[in-house]
Image (tube, helix red, strand yellow):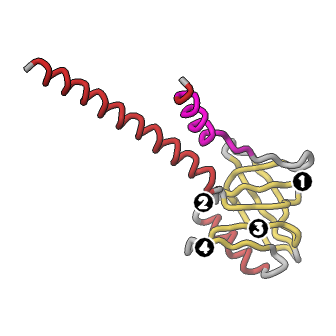
Amino acid sequence: MKKIALILLFISSFISSQTLYAQDTDQLVNGFIKDVTLEDININLFLVDNFGNDFILEITPETEIGIETQSGERWVGNISENQDYVFNLLEEAQHSLEPMTAKYSGNKITSIVSYESSNIKNNLGYLAGSFIFLAILFFGYIFIINNKLKILSSKK
């Protein structure tokens, strides 16, 4: 019985959910870029979420940005480093319909990332859970076949 409890505890440690919490004043929006415009030192971003709600938000020099490039590399920085490059990356994300996640307060974005970017540790938990589940199924099948072979060999 202890072994079963330990196995269940081990499996449940991999299935635990990870949750992203924003600060009290911050809100999250997951959606697609509808339009991008350049305005002085800021970039205006028009996002639409899955429910059709429009958001007009500003990317300021303080905004943390993490975007996947077309070559699959990840660019991390802010617009004070290279505003035109960020603008081009956002236009590429708009044309390729890349989902984005923005954390914002008021109408100013505090951080924006490509939605596909995920924490590999979360994915490894699901991979390990799937592997353990399949291993249990495989060894259970072997056990059943072994018992049937014993029954057949004892009848001879």
x, y percentage for residue 4? 53, 28
N-terminal label among 2 and 3: 3
Query: Residue drawn at (69%, 57%), measured in percent from left and top?
Result: 100
Which residue bears the numbered disc 2? 97
Q: Quadrant of the C terminus?
A: top left
Which residue bears the numbered disc 1? 105
Q: Is residue 93 left or right of residue 7?
A: right
Which residue bears the numbered disc 4? 73
x, y percentage for residue 10? 58, 38
Give the foreground label among 2 and 3.
Answer: 3
Give the foreground label among 4 and 1.
Answer: 4
> Between marks 1 and 2, how big is the CA–CA gap?
24 Å
Label 2: element kind: loop
Give the foreground label among 1 and 2.
Answer: 1
N-terminal label among 3 and 4: 3
Query: Residue drawn at (88%, 60%), measured in percent from left and top?
Result: 108
Label 3: element kind: strand
> Between marks 4 and 1, how big is the CA–CA gap?
28 Å
Residue 12 - label: none
Kindly identify the amino acid type of the residue bearing the numbered disc 1: Ser
